[in-house]
Amino acid sequence: MDGSPTDRVATAVRARIEAGDLRPGDRAPSVRALVAEHGVAMSTAARALTRLREEGLLHTTARVGSVVAGPAGDPVPAPPPDAARLVRTAIGIADDEGLAALSMRRLAGAFGVPTMSLYRLVRSRDELLLTMLETVFAELVLPPADGPWRARLEGAAHAQWRVHRRHPWLARVLSLSRPQALPSLLRFAEFELAALEEVVADPVERFDLHLALTGFVRGMALTLAAEQEAQADTGVDADTWADHDPGLRTALRRHGGPALRRIGDHPYDLQRVLDTGIARFLDGIS
């Protein structure tokens, strides 16, 4: 053992299995749980779980993740996947470990089937991502369509944000410049445009505003995803980083003007920033 972070995490999980804290059939700690517990990068936690799977201590079960193996190290056979189970398993991997961890090979391992057998369900990883996008955006619950236009737009923006928070990878898949013609996205666009018809006469301006509002929420979701990844890699949240980063403090002293100095210690809160942005955007339409 060289005492690397991967070794430390693998040793800790292995010890729990040997002590009986984790028994055959129990779900192993997820990558994000190991990141929070041990303060390591997501890639480190993922490598530790891979090592334990290679040792036969864990196996992967569809829609569950890594599970403690039985005494012989043999997994319980999983039923062959269908398209819906494949997509749900892919969403679970992306939610838990990030989009980079998702591959057809990884999915095949989750079901215990050859990689090439999955291509009878989806033609490519790109097609899989589109199906994942449609599945998670279909979760979006829109406000009543007969309410005031502002309440409808505000509710739609916050509904979009909630889906992004549940699925941090979504913002990287969703495109505004090359929009995906998916039923759930078209339903969302129709809802916002119908609300905008009550206050904006020009159809080009209406669609511009729809793109701008959707893009603002997506941009905030990208910020959230980047911060989650940075915190997972460093173990330090944004507030702690800002409080202890000497380069930031030095730059503010040397280059910050009076307007910046009057801000003082900004209480960073991404949810508040989002709420403020949506409210001021809608004020502008009013």
Image: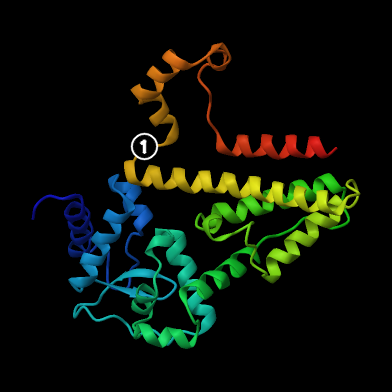
Q: Position of residue 70 (x, y in %)?
A: 24, 77
Residue 204's place in the image compared with 134, above or below, is above
Q: Count neighbours of disc 1 (C-alpha within 10 A) and say few if under 14, some if 14 to 19, many if 20 or more.
A: some
Residue 31's place in the image compared with 148, above or below, is below
Q: Position of residue 182 (x, y in %)?
A: 67, 70
Q: Residue at x 50, y 85 (%)?
A: 121
Question: Which residue type does callout 1 highlight?
Answer: Val
Which residue in the protein does label 1 denote? Answer: 236
Question: Relative to 133, is 237 on the left or the right?
Answer: left
Q: Can residue 52 be seen from the camera position used here?
A: yes
In the foreground, 33 or 19: 33
Q: Position of residue 123 (x, y in %)?
A: 49, 82
Q: Residue at x 56, y 48 (%)?
A: 221
Question: Relative to 136, is 104 on the left or the right?
Answer: left
Residue 167's place in the image compared with 235, above or below, is below
Q: Position of residue 44 (x, y in %)?
A: 26, 54
Q: Can residue 57 be seen from the camera position used here?
A: no
The colour scheme applied to this rendered structure is: rainbow
Residue situated furthest top in the rendering? 258
Element type at marker 1? loop
Q: Quadrant of the N terminus?
A: bottom left
Q: Residue at x 82, y 48 (%)?
A: 205
In the foreground, 209 or 235: 209
Q: How many marks?
A: 1
Q: Quadrant of the C terminus?
A: top right
Residue 91's place in the image compared with 143, above or below, is below
Q: Residue at x 55, y 51 (%)?
A: 165
Choose top left, top right, bottom left or bottom right for residue 132.
bottom right
Choose top left, top right, bottom left or bottom right for residue 146.
bottom right
